Amino acid sequence: MNPTHSHPITSTGTSPHAPPDDSKNATSSGSWKGFLVKVIKTALPLVLGCLGAAAFSVAAPAGWAFWAGACILTGLVTTLYLGYRALSEYKIDKIPTASQTPPTPSAQNLLSAANKSGKHQAYQIYKNQYHPTLMSIPDKTGFYDKGQPLYSLTNYHKGQNPITIDGVGWPTAEHYFQCAKFKVGSSSWSTIKNNPSPDHARVHAGNHFKPHNPDCLHGGNGHAWGAEKDRVMWKTLTHKAVDDLQYRTELIGTGNSVLFENSPVDYYWGIGQNGSGQNTLGYMHMAIRDMIRRGEL
Ligand SMILES: Nc1c(N[C@@H]2O[C@H](COP(=O)(O)O)[C@@H](O)[C@H]2O)[nH]c(=O)[nH]c1=O
């Protein structure tokens, strides 16, 4: 197999994301029921303390004023402590995640423009130029293996935040790409989306994309999906370029190097065992890199 070459990161891209909008955050503690339960739990010690104090004042045993005061003080301190804890949790709950953060209008506009009909063909210029002579190009950079440089260019890479596509947060590019073979919300779609492993997600999709499965789009037909998959991969990568800062930064850092997915098994997205594969993913990354440099992503 051809070696994977590392490449220094020489410059960084900037994400067109605005400060997050946390108003859309809806957690259990954010619901009115959760809020009410917390208020009751917090106030309960003080209420019990007051009741205890009232009981002492009615029974009026020797030194009742001291014990009544102790009840109220204990209740008050406990309530203040619980209130402080509830407020801290509330603040933690309010930290937004990327999946809850809609892209800014400018990022949204760029993504729409980048995904206009036919735009996904931008990578063809590189495929025409380098296929099938890629392996003889001196300045080329591979990516594939976990733990190696440029793993962020693989579709299995898990960024710091999910990638938001169609209003859903995706743990990896692979998750969205595989789910795109199935009807949104169907059982196959949900199983793939929620799979913790991108590799298992891919395998599950492969095992369930069949003509008899009613969850499938494109009739579960490999040829019909084949006509769509470039467009879907392009959409995936353009959104990844906006949401995954590590990918964006490391991609720009590859300079003008020709990129290739160093997969020994994939002859469409990667170069395959003997380097003769079509390397579609590598060329798409190069086209995305051009767009970032031009300020189009
Ligand atoms: N097998 C593999 C990757 N292969 C990925 O799997 C997808 C193949 O999709 P399909 O066209 O449905 O067969 C595609 O996204 C390709 O990049 N990637 C990785 O990082 N590590 C792996 O081990």
Image (spheres, grey):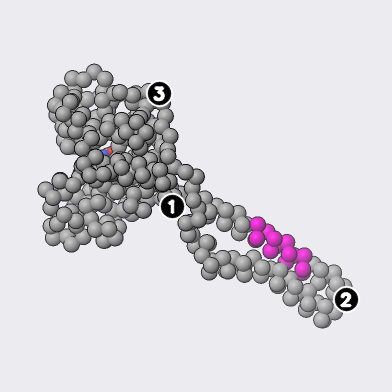
Alpha carbons under labels 3 and 2: distance apart: 80 Å
Q: Secondary structure at mark 3?
A: loop
- The residue that label 3 is drawn on is 10
Which of pointers 2 and 1 indicates the residue nearer the eye? 1
Q: Give 39 or 1, whichever is nearer the viewer.
A: 39
Alpha carbons under labels 3 and 1: distance apart: 31 Å
- The residue that label 1 is drawn on is 100
Q: Is residue 203 above or below residue 254?
A: below
Q: Amino acid at mark 1?
A: Gln
| Mark sitting on residue 231 | none
Q: Residues within 10 Å of mark 3 (few under 14, many from 20)?
A: few
Q: Quadrant of residue 130?
A: top left
In the image, the segment drawn in magenta is 71-84
- Counting from the top left corner in percent of width and height, residue 251 is at 34, 31
Taking 53 as reference, is 269 left or right? left
Q: Amino acid at mark 2?
A: Ala
- The residue that label 2 is drawn on is 62
- Counting from the top left corner in percent of width and height, residue 224 is at 13, 50
Q: Quadrant of residue 242?
A: top left
One can see residue 270 in this view:
no
Dot 3 or dot 1: first in sequence order is 3
Tell which quarter ligand 1 is in. top left
On-image quarter of the N terminus: top left
Dot 3 or dot 2: first in sequence order is 3
On-image quarter of the C terminus: top left
Alpha carbons under labels 2 and 1: distance apart: 60 Å
